[in-house]
Amino acid sequence: MLSSSLLRPLLRTSLRPLSTTVTKTSTGLVGLPVHPDPVPSLKSLNESILQSLDRLPPCGYKSNALQIANFRLKTIAESEGSVDHIEAEIDCGQIEELIIQAQDELKVVDMYYENKLWESIHVPEEEFVEAKKVEEGEA
């Protein structure tokens, strides 16, 4: 029979919360490493998207990108740092994939601005009014 002095360390180890004993070692996706500090990185990228979008005039792309970035920032704020909550709520992949999506979105905003793509798209007046409402936070 094991003495209680031998059992105590085993019990302490087995009663620790799982989150402190297990860390993510792989995304399971080839070429996509685990990000060392994903939540602050994702937050910063989405804040950068919002700043970049300020350069664009009202247009459909801007209103859609604003909605997505604001939703993701709201989700991050409500998550209290929980990667699982962020991934489940946003539902667009692992947090490392969300980071890549945000990095790509920043490139798209720059391309959209540099090429003035809002000028080449004819939008019916009613859609423009709706986009303007979303941008101003009325919708």
Image: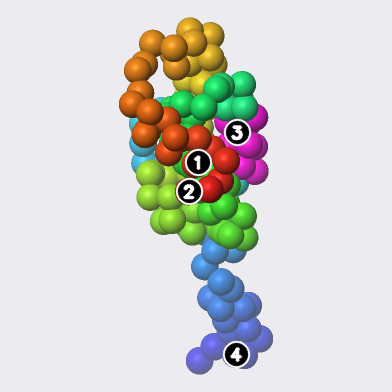
**Disc 4 from disc 3: Cα separation:** 61 Å
Residue 81 versus residue 71: which sits nearer the camera?
A: 71
CB atoms at circles 1 and 2 under 8 Å apart? yes
- Amino acid type of the residue that numbered disc 4 sits on in the rendered structure: Ser
The residue positioned 61% from the left and 78% from the top of the image is 12
**Magenta stretch holds residue 99:** no
Say whether disc 4 or disc 3 marks the residue closer to the N-terminus.
4
Disc 2, SS: loop
Secondary element type, mark 1: helix
**First to last magenta residue range:** 40-51
Q: Amino acid at mark 3?
A: Leu
Residue 19 to residue 74: above or below: below
| Crowd rating for badge 4 (residues with CA inside 10 Å; few <14, some 14–19, many 20+) | few
User: Mark 4: which secondary structure?
Assistant: loop
User: Where does label 1 land, which residue?
Assistant: 133
Query: Where's residue 7, x and y in %?
Result: 58, 84
Q: Is residue 15 above or below residue 103?
A: below
Which residue is identified by label 3?
A: 50
Mark toward the start of the polypeptide (4 vs 2): 4
Q: Tell whether 6 sits left or right of 134.
A: right
Q: Nearer the viewer, mark 4 or mark 2?
A: 2
Number of the label disc, if any, that sits on residue 139: 2
Residue of label 4: 3
Find the residue positioned furthest to the front. 125
Q: Main secondary structure of the magenta part?
A: helix
